[in-house]
Image (tube, grey):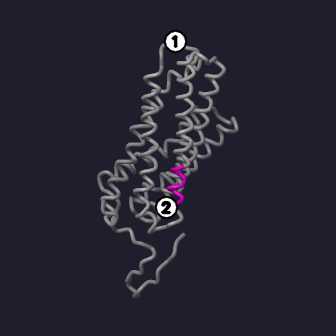
């Protein structure tokens, strides 16, 4: 991949971003039987091993796709703000850590069921760990990474239409605020308030992935460190943080 071609980088970035949708949503649905009935840990009921293991596998690829979006975009984003680009990589890594915590909790759930050593209270504990890891990772740090940081970088750089990037700038804080509201028991997880708050972020991420797959990054965005010639002559370089 030519890291000097923004269109190519943008298309690869878009495919990885779309992969986060194609892995995260099915995985969440596959975890449904365990999330809805933690007593399955005792060995009763239908065996959820296959569906949960498939969900865990999808989430492993989700972590890879999450990190890949940041790594692939880094050479382009750092031309606008090296600190911002590094912050995006870091936030995606932190999000991936919490996704991994959720994976481990549900795989441990399966292990306890297979060993016939679990009880309903323990099953509820493992599901609670998954729920809280999801709340902090995809439920909070996704707003930080994809909304606040990436939205701001895309708006400033013009790599994608700025009107689209505004969705991220608005949606990120809403996701973060709704996550905090759940932590403080102001609203319930997955309730109407949290669902509505995530709509702008979902629209931003989906539109960003599809736009980049089709169009790539705009090549007209200017490196703020490189002087350009305008109507009044040579402009001095700017050093944006």
Disc 2 target residue: 85
Judge depth for marks 1 and 2 and give the one in front: 1
Q: Answer with the quarter of the image where residue 51 lies.
A: top left
Residue 137 relative to residue 30: left or right: right
Q: Position of residue 183 (x, y in %)?
A: 67, 38
Q: Residue at x 45, y 47 (%)?
A: 66
Q: Is residue 45 above or below residue 178?
A: above
Disc 1 target residue: 45
The local crowd at label 2, few if under 14, some if 14 to 19, many if 20 or more residues have their Cα within 10 Å, is many
Q: Residue at x 40, y 51 (%)?
A: 208
**Magenta highlight on residue 15:** no
Q: Position of residue 36 (x, y in %)?
A: 55, 21
Q: Residue at x 30, y 56 (%)?
A: 215
Q: Residue at x 35, y 60 (%)?
A: 217
Extreme residue toward the top, this view? 44
Q: Is residue 81 above or below residue 13?
A: below
Q: Nearer the viewer, residue 168 or 132?
A: 132
Q: Position of residue 172 (x, y in %)?
A: 54, 50
Q: Secondary structure at mark 1?
A: loop
Q: Position of residue 63 (x, y in %)?
A: 46, 43
Q: Secondary structure at mark 2?
A: helix
Residues under labels 1 and 2: Cα distance?
Answer: 48 Å
Residue 122, label in figure: none
Magenta region: 85-93
């Amino acid at each position: 991949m030519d890291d000097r071609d923004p269109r190519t980088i943008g298309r690869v970035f878009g495919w990885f971003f779309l992969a986060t949708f194609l892995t995260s949503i099915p995985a969440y649905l596959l975890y449904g039987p365990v999330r809805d009935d933690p007593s399955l840990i005792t060995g009763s009921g239908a065996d959820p091993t296959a569906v949960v293991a498939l969900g865990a596998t999808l989430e492993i690829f989700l972590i890879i796709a999450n990190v890949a979006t940041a790594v692939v975009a880094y050479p382009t984003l750092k031309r606008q703000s090296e600190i911002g680009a590094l912050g995006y990589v870091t936030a995606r890594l932190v999000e991936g850590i919490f996704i991994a915590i959720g994976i481990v909790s549900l795989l441990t759930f399966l292990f306890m069921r297979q060993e016939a050593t679990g009880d309903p209270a323990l099953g509820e504990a493992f599901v609670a760990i998954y729920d809280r890891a999801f709340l902090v990772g995809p439920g909070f740090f996704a707003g930080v990474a994809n909304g606040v940081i990436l939205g701001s970088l895309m708006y400033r750089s013009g790599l994608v239409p700025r009107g689209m990037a505004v969705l991220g700038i608005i949606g990120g804080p809403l996701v973060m605020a709704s996550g905090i509201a759940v932590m403080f028991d102001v609203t319930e997880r997955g309730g109407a308030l949290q669902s509505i708050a995530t709509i702008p972020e979902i629209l931003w991420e989906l539109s960003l992935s599809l736009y980049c797959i089709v169009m790539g990054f705009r090549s007209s965005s200017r490196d703020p460190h490189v002087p350009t010639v305008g109507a009044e002559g040579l402009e001095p370089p700017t050093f944006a943080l």
